[in-house]
Image (cartoon, helix red, strand yellow):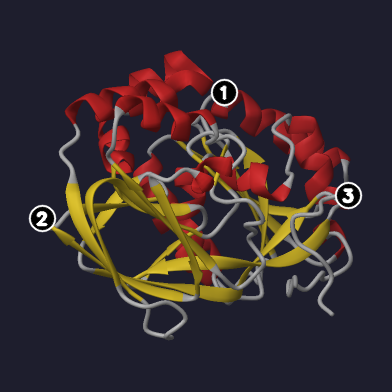
Amino acid sequence: MSRSGEQGAAPAGSGRAALIVNTRSRSGERVFFRALDLLQDMKVPLGATYAIRDPARLPETVREVMDDGSGYETLILGGGDGSVSSVVDFLAHRHVTLGLLPLGTANDFARTLGIPSEVEAACDTIANGKVVDVDLGLAGDNYFVNVASVGLGVGATEALSPWVKKNVGALAYPVAAVRAFLRHEPFTARLVFPDGDHEPVEHERLLQVAVGNGRFYGGGMVVAPGSGIDDGNLDVYAITLGRHRDLFGVARYLKSGDFIRNDSVSQYRTTRVRLETEPPLAVNIDGELVARTPQDFSVADNALKVVVPQASAAAHRHL
């Protein structure tokens, strides 16, 4: 059952908004000025506006805006999944609503929530949408919105250069995944479930272990059938490195999430899990390598307020 709380009126009428756009994202600079005009025309009460050319400055800028005493109730962020993930620590469990202008290569968080990628429609969502509470994942103390993974996902992140993302577009993730697969070394993982909802389990010769919070990752692949960003659970899966034709069978159904029915895949739904690997591995958190195994994962219920289209079914009224 969904537990997300629909918060009602659109952000435009509920307090001032700050606009921060990562102009290094695709078409970011053009979108910044277009969004500025559109939001003002739609009577969104904008205060501070920032065009950030160095993505590394995003977290610092968001922190300053949130803590400067201006009382912003909405943060409008232009960027991709990496931009969202880099600032979510400053928004979690606060009375601040995130409005999103999807500018990334994958935009999986926006896809999960049904937020349109066209700037005009995204601005209309911010001005006239509804506010819902969604879950966040936690890898140790690091929040994530989509997926944390070890194995192939890390290799794909390393192969996903800025040039590839900018020039290959939506095919960047499949291209990076193929490169990573050709270099992959299988590993062993042990999964421990502190809440006792599953027995501890060990998997050998693995291609990947992923822990999903949202519904989509990697440019539109589904974490698991029935997965959601408001269900209070994490979806964990482990893919065994088998025959190539078996792996192609897994890859064939990644878009629908039906890959978990393949014999090479083990799937668990839980609220907490500890991941141990041999050898120790880097952890990819929403496209950034910021941790290593062993790692504890958990879910933060209703931790983030986001404005979504009125018709979005990604998060529902709290019952």
Mark 1 or mark 2, earlier in chain: 1
Which amino acid does the dot numbered 1 rest on?
Answer: Ser
- Mark 1 — residue? 27
> Whole-Å distance between the Cαs marked 1 and 3?
27 Å
* Quarter assignment of residue 33: top right
Which amino acid does the dot numbered 2 rest on?
Answer: Pro
Point out residue 72 in the picture as x, y percentages from the top left corner.
66, 66
Q: Label 1 neighbourhood size at 10 Å, few (<14), some (14-19), many (20+)? A: some
Which amino acid does the dot numbered 3 rest on?
Answer: Ala
* Quadrant of the image containing the C terminus: bottom right
Viewer-proximal residue among 69 and 100: 100
> Whole-Å distance between the Cαs marked 1 and 2?
40 Å
* Quadrant of the image containing the N terminus: bottom right
At a point 77% along the width and 53% down the height, the residue shown is: 308
At a point 51% along the width and 71% down the height, the residue shown is: 67
Vertical placement of 281 versus 7: above or below? above
- Mark 2 — residue? 279
Vertical placement of 92 versus 311: above or below? below
> Which element carries disc 1, helix, strand or loop?
loop
Vertical placement of 168 versus 302: above or below? above
Which marked residue is nearer to the observer: mark 1 or mark 3? 3
At a point 74% along the width and 55% down the height, the residue shown is: 314
Mark 2 or mark 3, earlier in chain: 2
Point out residue 152 in the picture as x, y percentages from the top left corner.
29, 39
Mark 1 or mark 3, earlier in chain: 1
Viewer-proximal residue among 278 and 2: 278
**Tag shown at residue 97:** none
Q: Which residue is outermost to the bottom? A: 195
- Mark 3 — residue? 311
